[in-house]
Amino acid sequence: MKHNERNRRLKTLGVSKLRKVSAMALILAFTLVFWIAKPALATESTGIGPDTFLEVFNFIKDNHISNPDPNLLYRGAIEGIIDTLDDPYTEYMTPEDYEEFTFSLDNTYVGVGIEVQSGEDYPRVLNAIENTPAQKSGIKPGDLVIKVDGAEVYREPLDKVVQKIRGPEGTTVKLTIRRGELEDFDLDLVRSSINTPTVYGETLEGGIGYLRVSTFGAYTASEFRDSLNDLTREGATKLILDLRDNPGGYLQAAVQIAGNFVDPGGLVVSTVDRSGERIEYRTEESPVFKGRDVAVLVDGYSASAAEILAGALQDHGVATLVGGQTFGKGTVQAVVPLNSGGALKITSTRYHTPKDRIIDGKGLSPDVQVLTPGLHIAAAWRYLGRLEKITVNLEIDRPEAIVNGDSVALMHPVVQRSGEIYLPLRFVLEALGWRVDWQYRDGSIKVTGSTPDVVFYPDGGRVVCNGRSISETVPLLLENGVYYLPVSSAGLFSLDLKIDGSVVSIEKSF
């Protein structure tokens, strides 16, 4: 396989599959493992072996018309060996790659100090890290990065934008920022060494604490425990643990964090190698949040160590998973430093959850499925707060909804067609507590999880409510790949729905 093709495949399997990732580079769960390879024994086989490899290598090096650089041949040979494994997580790192990888694990990099996520058109600032060039310049969460050094970054991959922002320490980068309705403005920022916190916490209403873990780095476990203790002192009795877009990191960090919720000695994860040897990782510290309600937010970009932690808390019954199916990276990599200064990252074991689940390639299934990104926290709040009712307010063509008083971005607003008002089906029903599933075998849309259960058959115009066919309903509207529910069908779900001009108010009691 050619080098470019390998890069493309790795990107497809590793990075592109983890869209909307945080600005940090993808960090795979691994344990630092070192060993010294013994010399290979001579073989009597007539097949391809070390002698054949060296013979081919030397003939090419000495005779090929291109006079190839031996270093490039060595590199190609290494990559060729790795390609035969068909494993996107085993890779050779040059000394430069290894240095950057190590910095990323220590949450240190050279940049301006902003965490960004993919936006609809431009990267959106999640956070400006305290005491960094970005924070000192006044960059705020919600700002959009429009240009980097004068070049538009419209719909560019997030990792490419991040690489443009980073650079040698002491150099200057110009960012063009868009903030609300203000005119775009430029900021000249001097890059510096940044130590990035991996845990962000705040206290929400109703005694609910919120902790977001962006990655599992060298100091994440201690940051987490400190933040959790702070929230507890502030009166938090329930917790939303946000692992969305978390690509993983140190396995040991996940084990230590689990110790905040599980008794000492509790099994967090087991790793099993190719010979079947199993190693168990158990909690050691006394839990500081045992017996309290915890909702863990996950999505398709929660991977590796994030899945280890989420799976352990789910198996021990100490947390409810809210969101979507996780990524499904169920292997652990060992990092082997090489004499050349580079390193080999090699898949060495597969991990099992405490209930012996193998999630590699499958992921974890949430207990409460919510596939609309903006509704994850609202759904967790509904679960933790034991709410008696939910209110949703929307306005025709307005890209925003108010769910229980909180603003939620609406990618697909309410629309009006031929006098009928249509609601974005998935958003509205998930906001009100239903689960929405597309059934691939017959193209139906199944709505379950809260009375009543309804199945829509868009192709045939049929609706089945609690097992009985319903006639004379307005068909769903399909626009730009999104299904909309006509307000006239709201009666199927026993909703209290009111329309005041262009405003639609919906209330559901439990």
Image (spheres, grey):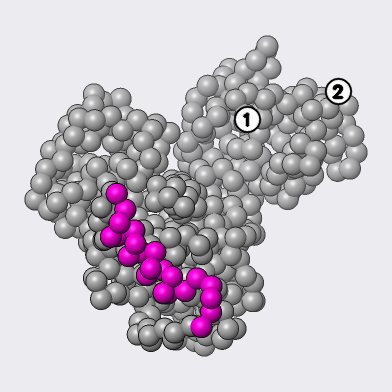
Q: Which numbered tag is attached to residue 482?
A: 1
Q: Residues within 10 Å of mark 1 (few under 14, many from 20)?
A: few
Residue 388 is a magenta residue = no
| Above-or-below relation of 105 to 499 | below
| Residue 11 shown left or right of residue 114 in the figure | right
- Of all residues, the one furthest to the top in this rendering is 418
Query: Residue at 38% of width from left, 80% of height from top?
Result: 33
| Above-or-below relation of 58 to 160 | below
Dominant SS of magenta comes to helix
| Residue 175 shown left or right of residue 373 in the figure | left
Query: Residue at 37% of width from left, 73% of height from top?
Result: 335
Depth order, front residue of 32/187: 32
- Of all residues, the one furthest to the front in this rendering is 63
Q: Is residue 236 visible?
A: no
| Residue 226 shown left or right of residue 454 in the figure | left
- Of all residues, the one furthest to the left in this rendering is 170
Which residue bears the numbered disc 2? Answer: 472
Query: Residue 193: which quarter of the image?
Result: bottom left
Magenta region, residue range: 44-65
